[in-house]
Amino acid sequence: MIDTTGTAEERAAVAAATDGELRLHDPAVRASADGVRLFDPEFVEVGASGRRWTYEEMVAALPTLHGGADSPRIEVSALRGVLLAPDLVHLTYESVIAGRRARRSSLWRKGAGDTGWRLYYHQGTPVPEG
């Protein structure tokens, strides 16, 4: 859900980050240069497995991770976003991948110039069954 309160600039920033996040769940984007361009060069992730990923590791593995062409789809629910600063959006949502639920948090940073919004930080936390 995109917050419909706030200024047009705030809503546009949250919408851009949301679009980027959801595009990264598309197998065609994950396997393309477009997917790579959605990551900030300083990107870091702490996955639901507890593994820490760097930009280089994520870019190399992205086409083969969940959500890729030959793996389970990523189901997203309860997506919310908020503009924390003019160049920083925080997204939260829940995902289900092959029956495993996780709560997710992403920070999207707007680059200088014309680089657009890029995923700067992502964390997944498993949701216990039941």
Image (tube, grey):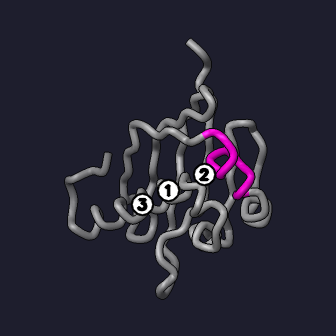
Q: Is residue 100 above or below residue 93?
A: above
Rendered position, 130 above or below 116: above
Q: CA distance from mark 2 to mark 1?
A: 10 Å
**Outermost residue, front side:** 70
Q: Neighbour class for label 3 at 10 Å: few (<14), some, many (≥20)?
A: few
Q: Position of residue 128 (x, y in %)?
A: 61, 19
Residue 45 lies left or right of residue 13; in this view the side is right
Is 63 inside the magenta-drawn segment?
A: yes
Three-letter code for the amino acid on which mark 3 is drawn: Asp
Is there CB contact under 8 Å for labels 1 and 3?
yes
Marking on residue 19: 3
Q: Nearer the viewer, residue 40 or 75?
A: 75
Residue located at (21% from left, 65% from top): 7
Magenta stretch in the rendered image: 62-72
What amino acid is labelled 1 in the image?
A: Glu
Residue 46 point in image, percent of width and height: 70, 46
Query: What is the magenta segment's predominant secondary structure?
Result: loop
The residue carrying mark 2 is 122
Q: Is residue 70 magenta?
A: yes
Lateral position of residue 42 relative to residue 111, left or right? right
